[in-house]
Image (spheres, coloured by chain):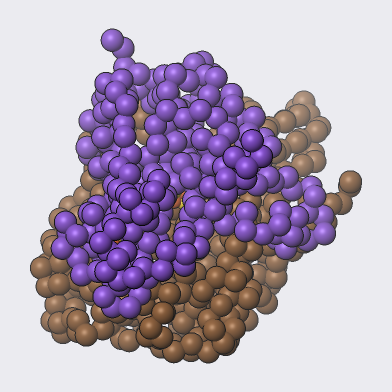
Chain colours: A brown, B purple
Amino acid sequence: MSKRNVSINVEYLTRVEGHGNIVVDVKNNKLETCQLQIVEAPRFFEGMLQGRSIFEAQHITCRICGICSCGHTLASIQAAEDAIGFIPSEQTTKLRKFLLHMENLDSHILHIYLLVAPDLLGVKSFVPLINTHNDIVRRALRMKKTCNDVCDILVGRHVHPISSIVGGFTKLPREKDIDAMHKLLHHLRKDMEATVELAAKFKFPEFERDTEYVGLVSDNDEYPMLTGEVGSTDGVRKNKKEYKSITNEFIVPHSSAKFAKLSRASYAVGALARFNLNSKKLHPKAKAVAKAVGLKPKCTNPYLNTVAQLVECVHSLEDGLEILEDLKKTGINYDEEIIVGLNEKGTIPVKAGNGVGAVEVPRGILFHNYEVDDQGIITKANCIIPTNQNVNNIEHDMKKLVPEILKKSDEEITLDLEMLVRAYDPCISCSAHFLDVKFVNR
Amino acid sequence: MSKPKVAFFDFACCEGCQLQVANMGESLLDVLGAIDVVEFREVMSEKWDQDFDVAIVEGSITTPHAIEKIKKIRERCKVLIAYGSCATIGGVNGMKNNFPLDKIREEVYGKDYKYFETVETRAVPQVVKVDYLVHGCPVYIPEFVNVLKAVLAGLPYQVPDHAVCVECKLNENVCVYEKGVTCLGPVTKAGCNSWCINNGNICYGCRGMVTNPNENGAKDVIEKYNVPMNLVRNKMNMYNQCREIDQSEQKKR
Ligand code: SF4
Ligand code: SF4
Ligand code: SF4
């Protein structure tokens, strides 16, 4: 067989959030370069937070990413409350868990339908699907809108939630609001069934690479999203305060995002990691779907992250409905509605401290860390987003994958690689942060 | 007339404003029926290398490369819409300008920071001519739809230049000054239907400042609660820091 040379340079990877480049260089069948380059214009969030009130942190950091804005909100609030020593009420925690479910559902649906489905249906984007698969496009938009409408009711809007703040909620849902949300989600079930049917027909590339999977773990029987410790499939278990010894960030010269590793060369976070760690705790209906589509832990095909997202969609929908039913039964205590502003009135007691938030957002575990002084002013901030943790793992996947598919044409290899990156649902726009850059060959 | 060709572009931002479009649900298909989307990197792999009628630009200009790119976009389009506060007024990215550029670069990138090019954050109208502004972080979809209608009809769109308080009172909210917290409503441009106050929070000033707060602002609110205008103006820098670029350039002239 003739020796293969492949040179791939995908600039501005489309259909991912943010900007990334794939660079692959194969000479005489030997893989010389294989990189996922992050080229996002840095936005300096951690720098900008310095000197601002801890009561503004959520408002600012949720604007790191429009897609996981509710996730950033919740991680930010958790870190802030941890820093100043505030303990949220049970009702607040319940509502936050519900909000996180909606975020997860919304984001996964966007990913499955608008970003992954076009590849699997053999078109360039969802736009041509408007003509060829109109019912699918309509369903996707309808489902997306339902999640959005539920968030509108709960927190004012989905992109940059308004009422969810440090201390609790500025506005709590009335009984009619709970009914309205329940009705919306109840109607979503039918579309969800159709989604499962559609996704079951998707054919994903066959590829396996065993890696370490990292996410929240706990001792109770709840699928951990908002609370818990940090664990891995290699047996690591640590308190979230020790997040830096989980991510062990390091620098590579070709990326403006830091890389992460734990027990081995790289690790993965996200729906598949959560599934591999906690599948036993999923809602029974989600378990049934996993069984039907043949997803079993420990699954080591990264392309199947999309399938794990599908399973999680069912979980978030069903568990979300149960939370609403529970809230309806217990009723809501409206005395907990708060107005804090910049804490001008000292509504919330403040002390100096260092707090960490660790929350499972759609793309994996997200860490926020703030240090505040005794006035509640931020002196140091750090955010480690899921994509940062995944980039290293994606590169290791690519390095194993490319030699296995050298028989394919350049176009096919490119598509396989693009699909691989897209499977991780990377949000590159927020992955550039806090670097000590060292340039190797400069 | 054939459908206008529309392209979406994003610069430094959270892409949340694009997402607001996807959140329109099935009514998005009506909008898509009236226009021909030729480039939209976040959801499309297709690329377009010819001229187009309308460019919808999201995000702030923060690198030398971005300055060149936005200038080229301007040359290729007939109408340019600055979409979302990152684009219209610099938005949250402007907070970077609170710090000396070298200092914040070093803070984030360590001693080799010079390899990471960045310039002072600028709003799109501070770099190229803009025909329509859609303020908001994120944009308020009903307003965007109105702007789009105006664009398609070839009519101008006037951003309201009165304060959020006006809408807030129509919505019968209890003023948060009544509860002892500060709100930027009296100095912020309306058009969002007092979104945040309706949901129990304060206005953070995301739509930019009214031209003349003492005239166009909610005068009675300012008087009634003795709103400390200096303090309020200072707070505006979460979203409005970039206006200092205009002010310093005016001084130079
Ligand atoms: S204006 Fe706000 S919502 Fe829109 S892109 Fe910028 S940060 Fe995101
Ligand atoms: S100051 Fe704020 S709360 Fe009071 S009327 Fe104006 S917008 Fe409404
Ligand atoms: S109330 Fe203020 S902060 Fe909220 S959307 Fe309107 S202008 Fe923006």
Please give the count of numbered marks on the rendered protein: 0
Q: Residue at x 67, y 55 (%)?
A: A257
Specify whether A201 is left or right of A62. Answer: left
Pick the front one: A185 or A397: A185
Vertical order, B203 against A375 (above or below): above
Quadrant for residue B5, please give it. Answer: top left
Residue A13 in the image, given as x and y percentages of width and height = 57, 38
Residue A440 in the image, given as x and y percentages of width and height = 87, 51
Q: Splitting the image into four quadrants, where does ligand 2 fall?
A: bottom left
Q: Residue at x 23, y 74 (%)?
A: A172
Residue A273 in the image, given as x and y percentages of width and height = 50, 65
Vertical order, B253 against A226 (above or below): above
Q: Is residue A60 visible?
A: no
Q: Residue at x 58, y 75 (%)?
A: A378
Q: Work out which residue is located at the far top of the displayed protein and give it.
A: B1
Q: Residue at x 63, y 76 (%)?
A: A379
Q: Is residue A329 visible?
A: yes
Quadrant for residue B12, please give it. Answer: top right
Pick the front one: B97 or A190: B97
Pick the front one: B195 or A280: B195
Residue A128 in the image, given as x and y percentages of width and height = 35, 27
Q: Quadrant of the N terminus of chain A?
A: top right
Specify whether A187 is left or right of A342. Answer: left
Vertical order, B173 against B195 (above or below): below
